[in-house]
């Protein structure tokens, strides 16, 4: 059986340091790298003994990310979710196995995890395979119909109403929508509920929108393409709401290239509140999506699912809020 002394010898630290890290001693002054090295060593040596001080045990949490590392860096919404997960795990001495669907044989890396967080959009077959690995599982940013599976998603209905109420209060009656399409592993389209919510809101409030709805992908490049397609129609809405900040940033680039000014000529709103949105010219009004909190809450919940094995799953929606900057104006 692996002992604390074995871990200390392998990690190159003292047994006391190992003990305090495994017991989550908040008073210990040690670098994050050393802490993670000890946790990795404990995992590799299959250390499972409960600590006397806290009653906790070292366990392994798998993270499967549907984005590739490159996509994650380009759109930091999913990066923030993962950072929220990993920060919670670091604070609670939880070993993390991080995988991406783009990784070769990524499912093999998850075989021995105790719990699993799935970030993004997955097919029914993938969901079934994940559940075969562990019953301690939660899906983030994806609603799952199965009532036995815990999920955390965003409250898109309130978010879209907040954004559109803001634009209509500024006097806008011609509003466009730039959305993105996402496809699951089985090739099926995962619908963006924000589009249907947008259309329903506009119809309810007798707003002109039918000619200004476009969908592509959730990238800066697609925002640029869609905005140029709108500009080529020679009729513009007075305001546009985008499904993501990258789409809005691409749209802003297209408008700037054609000497159309935001917000003087057209108002523009994003969604996510990524780090770049505050540094565009002008700074982007957007809907803040609590991505980091989603990750942190998800890690906390699956941690307790693992310990308590509750019979009832949780379906949680996180509220979003408007971040008012300078890309929208009253008309």
Image (spheres, helix red, strand yellow):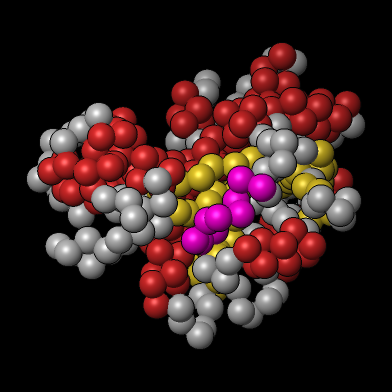
Total numbered badges shown on the rendered structure: 0
Q: Quadrant of the C terminus?
A: top right
Q: Nearer the viewer, residue 8 or 246?
A: 8
Query: In the image, 64: left or right of 217?
Result: left
Residue 181: % across, % down: 79, 46
Residue 21: % across, % down: 22, 46
Q: Nearer the viewer, residue 29 or 162?
A: 29
> Magenta segment range?
108-117
Query: In the image, 220: left or right of 315?
Result: right
Query: In the image, 32: left or right of 226?
Result: left
Q: Given the current orientation, which residue lies at the most extreme left position?
A: 27
Determine if the magenta segment contains residue 91.
Answer: no
- Name the residue: 58% across, 66% down: 134
- Name the residue: 73% across, 21% down: 254
Q: Is residue 84 visible?
A: no
Residue 106: % across, % down: 67, 43
- Name the residue: 70% across, 74% down: 145
Q: Given the current orientation, which residue lies at the most extreme front position?
A: 1
Q: Quadrant of the N terminus?
A: bottom left
- Name the residue: 53% across, 56% down: 113
Q: Nearer the viewer, residue 77 or 96?
A: 96
Q: Nearer the viewer, residue 92 or 198?
A: 92
**As displayed, is residue 121 above or below residue 239?**
below
**As displayed, is residue 111 above or below residue 72?**
below
Query: In the image, 238: left or right of 4?
Result: right
Determine if the magenta segment contains residue 115.
Answer: yes
Q: Is residue 193 visible?
A: yes
Q: Given the current orientation, which residue lies at the most extreme bottom position?
A: 311
Residue 46: % across, % down: 41, 51
């Amino acid at each position: 059986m692996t002992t604390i002394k074995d871990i200390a010898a392998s990690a190159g630290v003292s047994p006391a340091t190992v003990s305090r890290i495994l017991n989550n001693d908040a008073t210990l002054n040690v670098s994050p790298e050393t802490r993670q090295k000890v946790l990795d060593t404990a995992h590799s040596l299959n250390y499972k003994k409960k600590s006397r001080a806290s009653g906790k045990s070292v366990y392994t949490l798998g993270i499967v990310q549907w984005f590739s590392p490159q996509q994650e860096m380009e759109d930091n919404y999913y990066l923030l979710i993962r950072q929220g997960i990993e920060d919670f795990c670091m604070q609670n001495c939880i070993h993390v196995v991080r995988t991406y669907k783009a990784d070769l044989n990524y499912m093999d890396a998850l075989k021995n995890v105790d719990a699993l967080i799935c970030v993004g959009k997955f097919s029914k077959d993938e969901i079934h395979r994940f559940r075969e690995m562990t019953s301690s599982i939660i899906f983030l940013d994806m609603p799952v119909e199965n009532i036995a599976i815990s999920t955390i998603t965003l409250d898109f209905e309130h978010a879209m109403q907040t954004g559109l109420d803001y634009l209509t209060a500024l006097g806008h009656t011609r509003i466009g929508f730039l959305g993105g399409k996402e496809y699951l592993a089985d090739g099926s389209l995962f619908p963006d509920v924000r589009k249907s919510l947008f259309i329903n809101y506009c119809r309810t409030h007798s707003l002109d929108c039918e000619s200004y709805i476009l969908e592509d992908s959730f990238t800066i490049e697609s925002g640029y393409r869609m905005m140029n397609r709108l500009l080529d129609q020679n009729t513009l809405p007075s305001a546009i709401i985008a499904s993501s900040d990258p789409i809005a940033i691409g749209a802003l680039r297209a408008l700037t290239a054609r000497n159309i000014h935001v917000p003087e000529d057209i108002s523009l709103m994003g969604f996510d509140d990524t780090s770049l949105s505050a540094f565009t010219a002008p700074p982007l009004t957007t809907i803040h999506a609590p991505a980091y909190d989603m990750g942190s809450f998800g890690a906390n919940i699956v941690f307790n699912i693992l310990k308590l094995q509750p019979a009832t799953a949780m379906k949680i929606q996180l509220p979003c809020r408007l971040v008012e900057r300078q890309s929208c104006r009253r008309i």
